[in-house]
Image (spheres, coloured by chain):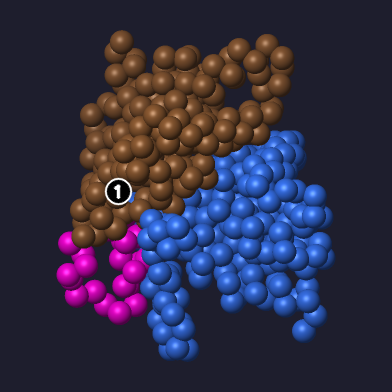
Chain colours: A blue, B brown
Amino acid sequence: MSKASERIYNGIIKENPTLVLTLGMCPTLAVTTSAINGIGMGLSSLVVLALSNALISALRKFIPDGVRMPAYIVVVASLVTVVQFLMQAYTPSIYASLGIYIPLIVVNCIILGRAEAYASKNAIYPSFFDGIGMGLGFTAALTLLGAVRELIGSGTILSDGSKALVQIPEAVYSPASIFVLAPGAFIVLAFFIAIMNRIKRKHGMKPAEVPDYISEEKEEA
Amino acid sequence: MVKLLIIAISAALVNNVVLSRFLGLCPFLGVSKQIKTAAGMGAAVIAVVTVSSAICSLIYDAVLVPLDLVYLNTIVFILVIAALVQFVEMVLKKNSPSLYEALGVYLPLITTNCCVLGTALTNVQDNYNFIEAVVNGIGTSVGFLIAIVIMAGIREKIEYNDIPESFKGMPIVLLTAGLMSIAFFGFSGIL
């Protein structure tokens, strides 16, 4: 398998940022009220991830170790601002429905996490594809989550307001709107991760742990 | 005055930062194992969010708007927050070692806590003036403290429960958060 396709496989399946690494929870839960929003958020994060990985990898020999975090944040924040402008111009309706979560891509832990864990140690080409793979994995998870919530919560899939890919008639199923509201996000993601845990357990892998920042900090110190 | 009260209550309870706006989930899940650490994190968040709301609101009104650089707000805010956290850490270390001991480990985690940047951006989006921005910052971070302490309390008890194998760890915590979020819906009636 070539380096590029290996990185993409790694991002989508082996180290899926949402379902395996459980990173970047805030946008995952906040924007997945519909499949369209999930795709929009996923793709904009993908662009930022791929470009920031490539840029940080290109700059990795010039950025002094002590100030690398602020330097990464500036790179990511500039890219996010560019993406924000592009979305405002070309996809205004998605931009409006994602709202504040677009500028908040800056603090998405997936992006800084990949910059630190991969791009700062590897060449430009694999770093770029690592970003694409992670972005695709993120997009896939968000789209799936969005589609499930949309189906249970409003009885449609990929609806754009007037027409939808799949639409269950009101007479057959009356939508449980709580699933497009805040609690539904937590509950659907809980079941997703539980299913992943079961699959992983069958293959003898470790289930998803709740991250525990404080004890990790102490180990480092 | 009434408007300030409404902003504070709405930020703390009705639109709770974690349970209905999904900001600051990482520390909410990562530092909620024990009530004591959860309360420490909550206190650190209150300090940082309040001060950063004030400074970001000042910079926005006094620098970005007159210079017509509003589109740079994301970059400027995140830099201000990162510098502020570093500064708070240095001041605490020098002037009050005991407080630093208590909050020190949480401070680096706060820079990438999206509820800090999220609050600064909300203040701008909703056109809050300086005082309203500070009140919104306090309300939001108190809401965070409430949510994370309740969560830690529940998680301390969950430890002793018999949970299906696949739901252990992350899934049960998310389900708990979902139920808490339903409970917080009750507050939407008070405004």
Is A217 left or right of A17, judged from the image as shown? left
Report the span colored magenta: B157-178
| B151 to the left or right of B97 | left
Q: In terms of image quadrants, where is residue A12?
A: bottom right
Q: Residue A169: horizontal and vertical position, in percent? A: 44, 59
| Quadrant in the picture for residue A98 | top right
At 21% from the left and 65% from the top, the residue drawn is B158
When the figure is inspected, residue B113 is found, relative to residue B67, above or below; the finding is below
Majority SS type along the magenta span: helix
Check residue B175 for magenta coloring.
Answer: yes
Q: Nearer the viewer, residue A160 or B116?
A: B116
Residue at 17% over, 70% down: B160
Q: Residue furthest bottom?
A: A203
Q: Secondary structure at mark 1?
A: helix
Query: Residue, x 56% and y 50% (percent of image)?
Result: A108
Residue in front for this viewpoint, B96 or B45: B96
The residue nearer to you, when weighing A210 against B88, is B88
Q: As shown in the figure, which amino acid type bears the numbered disc 1?
A: Ala
The image shows residue B134 at horizontal and vertical percentages of 41, 21
Q: Quadrant of the N terminus of chain A?
A: bottom right
Residue highlighted by disc 1: B38
